[in-house]
Amino acid sequence: MATDSFKLRRPWLKNRPWDVIVFLNEDLCRKGNAQHGKTSDGYEKTKVFWEAEFAKEMDIRDAIDVCLKCHRSAPFLNFNGNTFAAVARQFCQSAVEELDRAQQKAFISTVGHYVAGITSASELENALRSVSIALEKSKK
Amino acid sequence: MTRAEYEKLLEEDPSLKETLKIGLEEQWKFSPEPVLSKTGKGFLRSAGVSEIQAVKKEQRSKENNAGGDR
């Protein structure tokens, strides 16, 4: 099932309405002893973007990019990167459960680094390609 | 959505609970303040080699156990 879900366009983010993102950030800020709050320049535009995108069916690459864009827009005062990277890592994790742990870890780590803004798009593409091949093999 | 509704969702939706768990586990790697939006380049503290070493060790041990079962 995970093999198919990795390839198909799916509403990867649909269980994460904006309010959930806000509460996730609030929890992360509380645990991290950081102030939770909205930024004056990033919050509204990110909220509008997320609400327009989150329920859409899209391929996994596009869903990861939505998380990166929202991180870049910095809607919150603190822990934007962690909030959106955690969302991306979780749905990507669910897509590669058939793989062994080392392969899963490598892929999830690349996704986390990409959403954090320190890994290039080509590295993500390579990781997606490798995982796609590995999932095909695991099916046989 | 209220805080109470979110907390109920956390209890009912394992994937949301997992998302929060991932965020908390990875928190130390992130800088709290926005970096990517200000500099165009993100920031993440390195986990070093310990993480990947642990995965490789686990993998080797699994392979050895599988070999021993044959």
Image: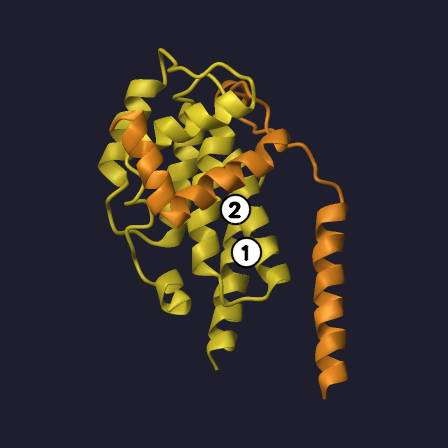
Q: Are marks 2 and 1 in contact (CB under 8 Å)?
A: yes
Q: How far apart are marks 2 and 1 (CA)?
A: 8 Å
Residue found farthest to the bottom: B70
Q: In this view, does B14 lie above or below A132?
A: above
Left or right, B49 with respect to A98, comes to right
Q: In this view, does B54 lie above or below B7?
A: below
Q: Quadrant of the N terminus of chain A?
A: bottom left
Where residue A59 sits, quadrant-wise, is: bottom left
Q: Which chain carries label 1?
A: A
The orange-tinted chain is B
- Residues marked 2 and 1, same chain: yes
Residue A77: x and y, percent? 45, 16
Left or right, A43 with respect to B47, comes to left
Residue A25: x and y, percent? 43, 27
Q: Chain A is drawn in which colour?
A: yellow
SS of the residue at dot 2?
helix
* Residue bearing mark 1: A127
Q: What kind of residue is marked 1?
A: Ala
Residue A41: x and y, percent? 36, 13
Query: What residue appears at the point 39 percent right and 43 percent down from the top-left corner?
Result: B16
Residue A44: x and y, percent? 29, 19
Q: Mark 2 lies on which chain?
A: A
Which marked residue is nearer to the observer: mark 2 or mark 1?
2
Q: Between residue B53 and residue A111, name the one nearer to us.
A: B53
Q: Between residue B26 and residue A81, name the one nearer to us.
A: B26
How many other residues sit within 10 Å of disc 2, few (<14), some (14-19) or many (≥20)?
Answer: many
Left or right, A67 with respect to B32, comes to left
* Colour setting: by chain
Query: What residue appears at the point 58 percent right and 31 percent down from the top-left corner?
Result: B27
Q: Residue A111 carries which label?
A: 2
Q: What kind of residue is marked 2?
A: Val
Left or right, A90 with respect to B66, comes to left
